[in-house]
Image (spheres, grey):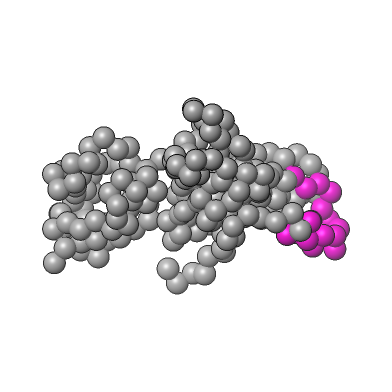
Amino acid sequence: MEKKLKNIFVDGPIEPVFISNSIANHSRKTGIGGHSIFLGQIRADPKEGNKEVVAIDYSTYRDMALEKAHEIREETFNKYDLHCMHIYHSLGKVEKGGISLFVFTSSKHRSPAIQACNELVERIKSELPIWGKEILSDDQTNWKVNT
Amino acid sequence: MTIKIKAFGPIADKMNARELELDPPGNLDDLRKALHEKYPQLVHLDFAIAVDRKIIRENAPLSPGSEVALLPPFSGG
């Protein structure tokens, strides 16, 4: 790949201060009238035997994921009238309550931002080669299945 | 000469390896057959095959330099 693809991966959880800085960075883009933000959070899912999910450890096929994310980004920009689009996904371990996915779209009016954000989340979950291994309270592991 | 096949997520876990090796198959159908013969544990696992980072569901020729990967169902987000 000669082309430099935009990185979407963050090591560990996506910190709330990173998200607030990302919002603040748009204050000079005064053509924007609406932002839509999706945050995916690690849920302490109850599991059989009185156990629960305490963290998810994410891994990826990085080269393919970045190529696919680039393709999704281009298609979404062509489909919706957006000013900006940002996608971040965690790799490695994120504990329950931590943020592992941050999708941020901005447009002149609200509708394209909201629709594009929803579509991006669905496509990220179904098309990017990323795998989440759930770590349970007894240290056992279980591969997450997306529904 | 063998080709190396990348394995990810639950497949890498189950095989206890991030890379599998095979004699170079001529096409994807041969690859599927050879994988199941050499690694019978794969028969019960659900995965797609990517060639040069694109998922290919039907048959297609493989060249010695192809980047081949086994992709279990994605679970990001």
Q: Pick whichever, A98 or B34, lies toward us.
A: A98
Location of the N terminus of chain A by quadrant is bottom left
Above or below — where is A142 with respect to A19?
Answer: above
Q: In which quarter of the image is residue B32?
A: top left
Q: Which residue lies most toward the bottom here? A: A2
User: Could you tell me residue A144's position as x and y percent?
Assistant: 47, 39
Relative horizontal placement of residue B34, taking residue B53 as reference (left or right): left
* Picture residue at 70% right of the left edge, 56% below the top: A15
Write the start and end of the magenta stretch as one range.
A18-36
* Picture residue at 37% right of the left edge, 45% below the top: B10
User: Could you tell me residue A9's position as x and y percent?
Assistant: 56, 59
* Picture residue at 74% right of the left edge, 54% below the top: A16
Relative horizontal placement of residue A57, taking residue B9 as reference (left or right): right
Q: Pick whichever, A8 or A48, lies toward us.
A: A48
Relative horizontal placement of residue A76, taking residue A105 as reference (left or right): left
User: Could you tell me residue B76's position as x and y percent?
Assistant: 52, 45
Q: Pick whichever, B12 or B75, lies toward us.
A: B12
Asked if residue A43 can be seen in this view, the reply is yes
* Picture residue at 54% right of the left edge, 29% below the top: A50
Asked if residue B63 can be seen in this view, the reply is no
Q: How many labels does the image show?
A: 0
User: Could you tell me residue A82's position as x and y percent?
Assistant: 71, 51
Asked if residue A42 lies in the magenta stretch, the reply is: no
Asked if residue A23 lies in the magenta stretch, the reply is: yes
Above or below — where is A126 with respect to B67?
Answer: above
